[in-house]
Amino acid sequence: MLHKKGILIGGIIAALLMVGSMVLVRVHFVDAAQTLLSDMTNMGVVMEDIELHYSPLPFLRVKNLRVQSGMDTVRIPQLEIYPDIASLLTGEIKLRHVILQDADVKALAHREGGGGTPTGLELPAIFPDKIDVVSGRVQLTNSYHAEPLTVSASVEKGSSGFAFNVRSASISELGFKFSGRLEMLSTSPLKLNLQASQCSIDPSSFLGFLTGFGYLSNSTIPELAEAGKFETTDLNFSVDSAAGTMNVEAGGVLLDSTSGKGLVLQMGQGGTFKVSLEEAQVDAGELYAMAQKSERGRNATQSLCESAKLKSIVPQGTLVFKSVSLSTPPGSVANKGLSGRMTVSAKDLKLVLESLDGRKQELSISDIDADVELKDGKPVVSVRSFNVASATGGILKAQAFLVFPFDLKEARFKAEAIDFSLFDYNITCEAEKKNPLRTVFDTQLKHKESRISASGYFNSPRNSVSGYEAQLKSLSIRIPETKDDGAVSKVAAAPENFNFESLLGRDISGKASIRKFYYNDWPFSDVVVFVHSGKERGLIKASGKLFYLNLNADVVLARDQLAVQCNVKGRGTSLPSLIACFAKDLSVSLRGKIYLNANMFMQGGNSETLVKSVRGEASAKIDELHVFNLANLDPRLGFFIDLLDAVSFNPQGGQGLNFSTARLRAALSGKDLLINSFNLSGRQIQAWGGGKYSLADKHLQLQGEVRSVLGTVNSFNIDRKLKS
């Protein structure tokens, strides 16, 4: 019985305590609600409807809450506020839980002038530190039509702003889609921090943000907007538009097929930045394709192709950049470029070259290891190894130290090519430059049937007033003569006009000395060439020897014109040796020593007009001229037989002709040699007269008289086509 009474009494006491607690909670909750609503009203909060609920737990429901502060607005269709029950029992007003349904916040990301005090999202101080947001939206605006940041997360209210632990969110103004932690410190000016394990970025939107907030100019990297995929891992991102700073750290970066790790980027308004990257692997083909989408990239590749006489150069494979560190100078420093350094290597890198006639060839760069240092925008490249293999045969190896803009005096290199084939060209070469001035080389170049070989050294200018200098031990140029085809020549295209613009426009001077120079079978020696190129015209002066003939030539180049003046003088040069330069088999039929003096001038805008313009005069004397084996004489010397026929002289087998002297005076006009006079003085016959020789069709015409050994004089008329 006593036990039952005890339970009843305990129940009554508990009921009284519960009722008393509910009364206290109700009284204090009403006070808390009045205080909260008063605070919110003082903040300029407008509320459409307020409801007090007590079951099962007391809470306050506010509908269609709206806060307007300048251009910033906060709209909350429904707000539920739950008090802390234990605190209410003691009379202390403390909120336990706040739920925001469909909250919508719009605020300027940054304000014009930016001189005011930063403003952020503010709620009454009585609000708890943690708030639940269900389908909330935050939209930062500043002339952008940006999609809002959609948040469904718990919110931590700090001393200024809020921290969102976001499961899935997007910031369209930045182009970010992420999951992680977002700290919104201020909306005007924009101050936010973001930590995201995964973040995908829309390149076009992000570039728009960078240019809109003044971190980049519109022309800096427009190619970024063309990228398709931009993702980061372990991202730490912060921006402060008032201070004009943006900081980015990422454990991993993926831009289309280009990947990187260990990114640290600091940017300031006005285009200043500092970036470091542990490693980046760049798809060369993708980089080339991106460059082709911009006018700047297309112009750069077109200029490269034009200088290389190629239709296209397309890279394939991967470039690897390590220990990248780049920075721009402060905005107050003018006319300064990018500075920093990096190491460059490659994986399976290839270059696909296309010639102007559509042929393709592949070069494989099996090894590249280089350091690149930028000093105020000027690259300094140290190449430890560079190995290239041609798909059609041959290898190229090189080491180099290069400064750009290219400075030959500062350059150092060592290169070796072994039967390196590129389209119709094949090169074997060794070249080395160990000091500022001298480059030593030994080169053999083949192009179809042509051959060029040279060895010697090349000196860079010592100073601004001195020129280039080349000393060649030997130079050999062998170009097979092209045979004229009458059928082809009738439909031949018009000759291409001269264009020497690439040789003009720069003040260049130099000198080349060549000990031995072979042009086909012409053995020149002691050749000296002086070159000077100015803005409007260039001048070349050359001298040398061909056997005992002294040769001098002056060449003047204008943009589309060429003028040449030549002089040839010689005393006692071997006639067979001189003729052998033109026809080896003809030289065996003649002996003698020639004395020659010739002057020639030509000028034109293409090869055809240049030849037609030839004007000059020549005089020659041959001592002890001997013509061997008349019975079996070369047809090209058949005019000697015509002279003998004029006096009825029939040579016997092995018999020849001897002349003590032979003289010739002639004028040059285009492709014609106008023979003013010739004279042959010999014991067997004497002959004199004049005529014409056409160089174009090898047509010889002579008229004159011949005296026999018996003293009879007969006239002759020779008309021969000389076969080559």
Image (cartoon, rainbow, N blue to C red):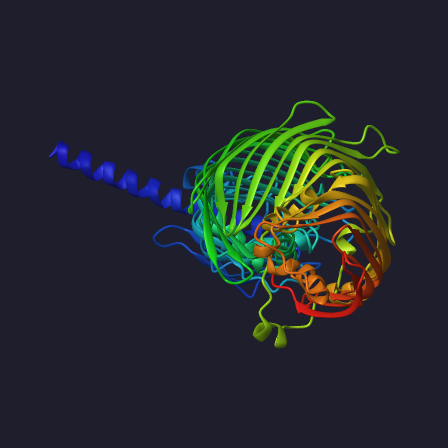
| Relative image position of residue 26 (x, y in whole percent) | 45, 49
Mark yes or no: residue 582 visible.
yes
Image quarter of residue 191: top right
Outermost top residue: 435
| Relative image position of residue 248 (x, y in whole percent) | 57, 39
Mark yes or no: residue 323 visible.
no
The residue lying toward the viewer, choosing from 463 and 117, is 463
| Relative image position of residue 397 (x, y in whole percent) | 51, 32
The residue lying toward the viewer, choosing from 208 and 244, is 208
Outermost left residue: 1
* 695 sits left or right of 448 in the view: right
The quadrant of the image that shows the C terminus is bottom right
The residue lying toward the viewer, choosing from 428 and 274, is 428
Image quarter of residue 472: top right
| Relative image position of residue 57 (x, y in whole percent) | 37, 50
The residue lying toward the viewer, choosing from 73 and 276, is 276
* 471 sits left or right of 321 in the view: right
* 659 sits left or right of 492 in the view: right
The quadrant of the image that shows the N terminus is top left
Residue displayed at 63% across by 31% down? 441
Label total for image: 0
